[in-house]
Amino acid sequence: MVANGLTNVHAQAKQETPGADLIVHNAKIYTGNPAQPEASALAVKSGRIYSVGTDAEVLALQNANTRVIDSRGRRLIPGIIDAHTHVLNEGGYNYTLRWDGVPTLRRALAMLSEQAKRTPEGHWVKVIGGWSPYQFEENRFPTMDELRRAVPYRPLFVQYAYNRAFMNQQAMDALGVGTDRFPNLPGTELEKDAQGKYTGVVHGYTFMFIAIETMVPQLSFDEEVSSLIQTIHSLNRFGITSIVDAGTGFRGYPKALPTVDALARDNRLNIRMPFVDIQFGDDAAFNMVDAQLTAITKTAPISPGHNLHPQLAHGHVYRGAGELLSADVHDHENFDRPAVIIEPDKMRELVERDVSKLVQRRIPFREHISYDENITPFLDALVKLNEKMPLDGLRWSLEHAETISPANIAKVKALGGGIALDTKMALHGDGFIKTYGRDKALQTPRLRQLVDSGIPLAMTTDAFRAASFNPWVGISWMVSGKSVSGTEVLAKDNRLSRIEALGLFTRTPAWFMDAESEMGMIAPGHLADFALLDRDYFEVAESQIKSIASVLTVMDGRVVYGAQDYQSLSPALPEILPTWSPIKHFGGYHQTP
């Protein structure tokens, strides 16, 4: 038995050959590591970076099996981490036509018309989030007449963020607009014309749009798996190697697990995807936190930090509760309308009744609060809770916090919390100005003060519905101060340097994954996640930042995306399902032909 054991040890030792698995050289590497800010080459072994330096130093580490990639002088950065997005919400990704990045309304309408012709009977033509009327050259919404002409024979549903939607007659009939079948939730407004007929335009808040999504044709399991593959592929295109899934309105834990497992079991999950969880219910007395505790202790037992992926570090790790802990205190983020102000007693009750249960069990939590008027009572209650039930290093965060005040920034810091901001002002800042005025927009959020505060801080996309999944749109806004329309929406003294802006999508988000010791930098011992860019972020004009994409994305030491010179290195993806999918024909983000 001892001899057999020694034989196995020797066999394993022989398999572990010296030298690098992967070397990238001739690069302009921004490491994010203050001790070694720049380099020209890196070496990877067993999914981790183990050497960073000059070409000569690193190329000396190759052996006969090393894959060597010449970057041809391109800029290389740490892999982008989106610490608040909603990948698992996009089970229907392959059914959705995406207008992300489309430069003109004329082209957007033409895409609708093309898709309408290939969409089979029984299915809808849908555009769900990720776009803004201010991105279009025409700088406006489509009219209902334009939409009806583009899609005359299939139900049409075009959704702008969680603010409004446009429906043709076929969609209104299918959804029962004007009847009790249509989800008439608080804040819902159905537009009517001069004759009292419904126009097809509906204004509302998050829950109304979530409810509608359950009423349209749903994907088969195989189509959902295909959708997850394509969603991740779209993220990899922009150099994203990790995300935190911030909860799903459709598939609370553990419902989404079979789809994720379909990729994880073959090590085909090409992104690190820790998650927090939301539980929804129909009962008026339904308690989201209680349902969360039931899900993780009884339905499918799991504890914070448990990785459900069998091979990938931080692959699919449970990171706690949120971003929604109670539907009663959800203040939404519809910048086309005045702020939703929650009764302070409700915010205090949430902390005393529900957050206390999480703190007692050492379960990390996140709470969506957009407006400072609601942040104040939440934090005041948290201060009192901390006095009798210490947070004591428990990771918690405010999500969004667009209008947070200096006083509340100080409270978050004193309580040891983090803040996950988002890039919605890049797409919707023009609407914010119309509602709240230019002066307030210029300080929304207080980027400079937040960065200088030293609070654990991340910039996120909050994709795929509230905003675009492309982080470079937000990075452009942080640096230039301009929205997608070119309007100034950030004051000059509230903007960030290019290094600071990139850091909010690379180094600092690692805190939200409890991974700051091994993610967010190009440094020995860190996980081998990085991206080679199609243009130099630090040298291109500000106007080009939003157009940056990756030509080579590496996650866990393996190539997960390749384009241009590196297209042959990109892993082969299965056929997109269904065959009429808009993603198959247009992709997930607009590409100039």
Image (cartoon, rainbow, N blue to C red):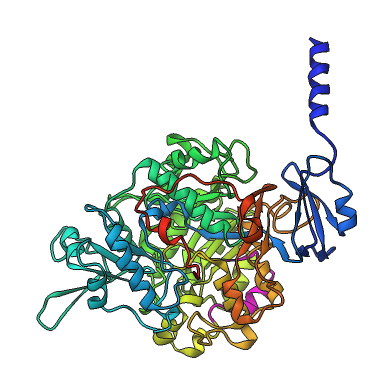
- 371 left or right of 410? left
Name the residue located 36 percent from the left edge and 48 percent from the top edge. Answer: 578
Magenta stretch: includes residue 327: no
Percent position of residue 465, x then y: 41, 64
- 425 left or right of 129? right
Q: Which residues are magenta?
A: 444-459
User: Which residue is farthest top?
Assistant: 1
Percent position of residue 280, x then y: 36, 51
Magenta stretch: includes residue 456: yes
Residue situated in front as seen by the camera: 161 or 333: 161
- 179 left or right of 399? left
Q: Quadrant of the N terminus?
A: top right
Residue situated in front as seen by the camera: 37 or 229: 229
Classify residue 103 by image quadrant. Answer: bottom left
- 170 left or right of 368? left
Percent position of residue 448, x then y: 64, 79
Name the residue located 59 percent from the left edge and 81 percent from the top edge. Answer: 543
Percent position of residue 100, x then y: 45, 68
Relative to 535, residue 254 above or below = above
Let me know if residue 163 appears in the view. no
Name the residue located 81 percent from the left edge and 58 percent from the top edge. Answer: 41
Relative to 167, residue 444 above or below = below
